[in-house]
Image (cartoon, helix red, strand yellow):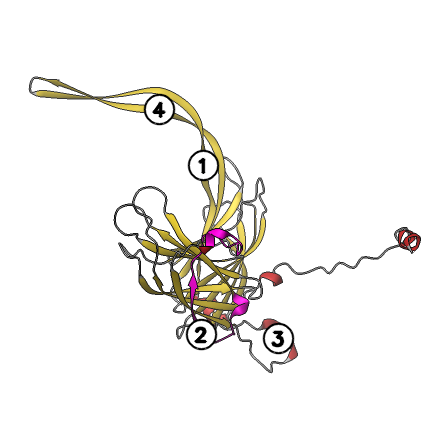
Amino acid sequence: MIKEQVANLYLWPKTLEVPILDQRATHKPVGMLHVKVVKATDLKKKDMMGKSDPYVKLKLTGEKLPSKKTTVKLSNLNPEWNEEFNFVVKDPESQVLELSVYDWEKVGSHERMGIQAYHLKELTPSETKSFTLNLLKTIDPNDPQNLKPRGQITLEMTYNPFKEDENLPADEEDSVVEKAPEGTPAGGGLLVVRVIEAEDVEGKHHTNPYVRLLLKGEERKTKPIKKNRDPRWDQEFEFMLEDPPVNDKIHVEVMSKGSGLALHSRIYVVILSLNSATLFGILMVDGLYGLIDIQESLGYVDINLSDVVNNKRINEKYHLIDSKNGKIQIELLWRSS
């Protein structure tokens, strides 16, 4: 039998079928997670003097976006927040909501008071679940440090999958734009921005392009691509909006980041008092060269969003302002409630 198994290893040709997946399809938004941070109880103080100043950080795994935060509750070991947050869900079977309670400090680093994690697959779609979790030292369930009480956190969570239009003709299925989940404020929805590529972008000092998106004070950035005048990113970003952005514009700017030498000097202010007169002087010494980051704009465009609200989907190339020949291709989708 061993000889047969070894012989099979040398039988050729061997065929290995590898399915090729559309990478963008695996990261397509499929729903929204609504989280309400209700309160925490019996937190253990971290400060030697007085009580702690807790706040909560929330992050959904699989996303590169910054963590969301509650407000800080000063001198309170049983804080109540009742603050709500929304997250775009791309894979409810694997994504996890990570929760960390921190003690805010005016000076120095903030000390973590406890953590927890909740798997989205435990939620029943479109049903609100309320629960209280014990805060832990680490996520490792076998860590003996988790036996020490650290307090509890109470949450309300709802996962609302996107709903597609039903009974559509076959030739219209590809043009469907999914709707925002139930519970989205009337008129609200999700704006999906796909940064596809740019062409003929060039900087004065370097060309390491990335794209910066700015809408209603929220910022998103693509990854940088080094030394490329025709970069392709093909990255998607989401902006959740409570009202249709019919009067808003999204700022799209191609940036380049590089390093350069700069002269650093120590500056001293010299003050001399002579009787009733005071003389001021400035003395510069210790000139040193060092590396600094240099940011450069390669061009920008402000896109009016009223068209995407009316048409649901736009895919166009835009000429970049302050660029000789630069263009950028952007796809916009509006998913209304």
Residue for badge 4: 265
Q: Earlier in the sequence, mark 3 or mark 2?
A: 2
Q: CA distance from mark 3 to mark 2?
A: 31 Å
Q: What separation in Å lies between label 1 and label 3 (alpha carbons)?
A: 47 Å
The residue segment tinted magenta is 120-146
Residue 54 higher or lower than 256, as above or below = below
Measured as percent of width and height from the top left, residue 100 is found at 42, 55
**Front: mark 1 or 2:** 2
How many discs appear? 4
Real-space CA distance between mark 3 and mark 4, rounded to the nearest whole angstrom: 64 Å
Q: From the image, tell me which residue sits under label 1.
A: 294
Camera-near label (2 vs 4) is 2
The crowd level at tag 4 (other Cα within 10 Å; few <14, some 14-19, many 20+) is: few
Q: Mark 2 = which residue? A: 128
Question: x, y percentage for residue 169?
Answer: 63, 81
Q: Are circles 1 and 2 on residues that touch, CB within 8 Å? A: no
Name the residue tied to disc 3: 173
Q: Position of residue 307 (x, y in %)?
A: 46, 67
